[in-house]
Image (cartoon, rainbow, N blue to C red):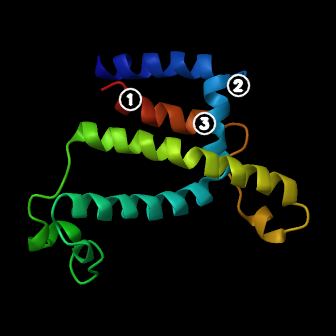
Amino acid sequence: MYVLMTTGPALVFLALMEKPLNAVTEKIVVFGRVPMFYYLVHIFFIHLLAILAAVLSGHPWWVMVDLTTWVTANAQLKGYGFGLVTVYVVWIGVMIVLYPLCRWFDDYKRAHQAEKKWLRRIRGYRRNWIPFTIPTMLPFLMM
């Protein structure tokens, strides 16, 4: 029953969102065209946010960049962490903040791909990116 309840809406959502591109998918496809760029920038950005959150929580900033121990095993970060709702809000906020930067890099990549060889090596998902991302994300979005 659970499989039917998650697969059915996922397939309906996929059928509605796959073709043609609409206002929502036109924005999301930008991340699919520059996946490596987004990945590298979002890791840096999220780590900066984590350091800022640690400082605002009363922990020293240098504890977050201590490479000798894992963050969760560090005794000085006892009590550091956030609930699931906060994590989702931060995730959506990071996507919104990084969208203009990814859009800029997508435009740059399309305009300069012929003369800059390194841009040809950084490939994103092209046309059929939705079948791989939406069904895997949908069960988490439906919670």
C-alpha gap between disc 2 and disc 1: 20 Å
Looking at the rendered structure, the secondary structure element under dot 1 is helix
Location of residue 5 in the rendering, given as x and y in whole percent from the top left corner: 35, 17
Q: Label 1, on which residue?
A: 141
Residue 98 visible in the current orientation = yes
Where 83 sits versus 67, above or below? above
Q: Residue 142: percent from the left, percent from the top?
A: 35, 24
Give residue 99's quadrant in the image: top right
Of the image marks 3 and 2, the number of the one nearer the N terminus: 2
Q: Where does label 3 land, which residue?
A: 28
> Which sits in the foreground, 19 or 40?
40
C-alpha span from label 3 to label 1 = 15 Å
Looking at the image, residue 109 sits to the left or right of residue 9; the answer is right
Give the numbered dot on residue 21: 2
Badge 2: residue crowd in 10 Å (few <14, some 14–19, many ≥20)? few
How many numbered marks have been drawn onto this rendered protein structure?
3
Please state, as top left, top right, bottom left or bottom right, where the N terminus lies in the image.
top left
Residue 141 quadrant: top left
